[in-house]
Image (cartoon, grey):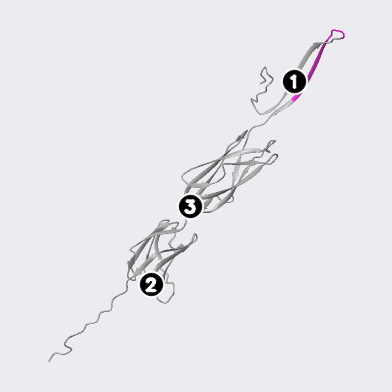
């Protein structure tokens, strides 16, 4: 549609021919003269922004490079893309990026800072919005031991984050009285809790946990040793 001021409004995608004609009287003979011209107007469907990253599952502290793509090249002066983050997770990213004039993509760095889902929405003029959602997982950490002391064979519960739910995929070792690292096979496992028993030869000290997320140590665990008792008779003999 074209208003009285000559401004065309796009109503649907496709091509249309816009014509204009002007008629006036010739100053020489007074005869009417018509001047006309036309042009083809192409109306395109708005394209969506697309956000991609090498990985969308991150551990707190990790970063990923996010690429914003528009299949329709950026106009003269470039295309400003505003970025808005939301969700239960936390992360840092720039407020906006610019796709250069004639270009089709721009990149920015996203860093995960808090566990949970985090979505980034990209908006730009004459573009449909694009989104990308990250799953941010907590880092491997040991929170507490219960109990904090015990004899060999004592059942210990370790709580924390990022434990592997498959017991065998968590390696738990104690400090040894001969400078070794006796393992304590994990009996049960969830992402936040492990149970195991104090192994023979264990010595007081921190417990070390290793899985695919890394290696961490607990606060010292006190290993209680059996006490030696001696009986002393006095007098030594009785007549």
Nearest the camera: 59 or 43? 59
The structure residue drawn at horizontal position 77% and vertical position 15%, both measured from the top left corner, is: 22
- The magenta segment is 28-39
Q: Quadrant of residue 193?
A: bottom left
Q: Residues within 10 Å of mark 2 (few under 14, many from 20)?
A: many
N-term-proximal mark, 1 vs 3: 1
Give the CA separation, mark 2 to mark 3.
32 Å
Residue neighbourhood size for the residue with mark 1, other residues' Cα within 10 Å, grouped as few (<14), some (14–19), many (≥20):
few
* Magenta stretch: includes residue 232: no
Residue that badge 3 annotates:
137
The numbered disc on residue 208 is none
Q: Horizontal and vertical percent for residue 138?
A: 46, 53
With 65 as the anchor, is 190 left or right in this view?
A: left
Q: How many marks?
A: 3
Question: Does residue 8 appear to the left or right of 168 in the view shown?
Answer: right
How far apart marks 2 and 1 lie (CA) works out to: 92 Å
Residue linked to disc 1: 19
Find residue 116 and report its horizontal and vertical position in percent: 47, 48
Q: Which mark is residue 202?
A: 2
> Looking at this rendering, what residue extends furthest in the top direction?
30
> Which element type, helix, strand or loop, lies under badge 2?
strand
| Quarter residue 15 falls in | top right
10 Å crowding of disc 3: few (<14), some (14-19), many (20+): many
Residue reaching furthest right?
28
Quarter of the image that includes the N terminus: top right
Residue at image point 49% right, 50% down: 113
> Residue 37 magenta-drawn?
yes
Q: Are marks 2 and 3 in contact (CB under 8 Å)?
A: no
Q: Is residue 133 left or right of residue 41?
A: left
């Amino acid at each position: 549609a074209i208003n009285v001021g000559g401004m065309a409004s796009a109503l649907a995608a496709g091509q249309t021919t816009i014509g204009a004609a002007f008629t006036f009287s010739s100053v020489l003979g007074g005869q009417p003269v018509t001047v006309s011209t036309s042009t083809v107007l192409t109306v395109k469907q708005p394209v969506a922004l697309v956000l991609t990253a090498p990985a969308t599952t991150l551990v707190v502290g990790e970063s990923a490079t996010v690429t914003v793509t528009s299949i329709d090249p950026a106009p003269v002066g470039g295309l400003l893309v505003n970025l808005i983050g939301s969700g239960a997770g936390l992360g840092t990213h720039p407020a906006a990026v610019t796709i250069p004039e004639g270009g089709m993509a721009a990149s920015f760095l996203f860093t995960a800072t808090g566990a949970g889902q985090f979505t980034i929405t990209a908006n730009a003029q004459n573009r449909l919005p694009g989104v990308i959602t990250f799953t941010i997982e907590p880092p491997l950490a040991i929170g507490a031991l219960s109990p904090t002391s015990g004899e060999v064979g004592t059942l210990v519960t370790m709580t924390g984050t990022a434990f592997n739910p498959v017991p065998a995929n968590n390696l738990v070792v104690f400090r040894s009285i001969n400078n070794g690292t006796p393992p304590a096979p994990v009996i049960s496992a969830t992402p936040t809790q492990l149970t195991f028993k104090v192994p023979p030869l264990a010595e007081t000290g921190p417990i070390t946990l290793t899985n695919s997320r890394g290696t961490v140590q607990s606060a010292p665990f006190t290993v209680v040793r059996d006490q030696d008792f001696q009986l002393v008779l006095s007098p030594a003999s009785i007549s």
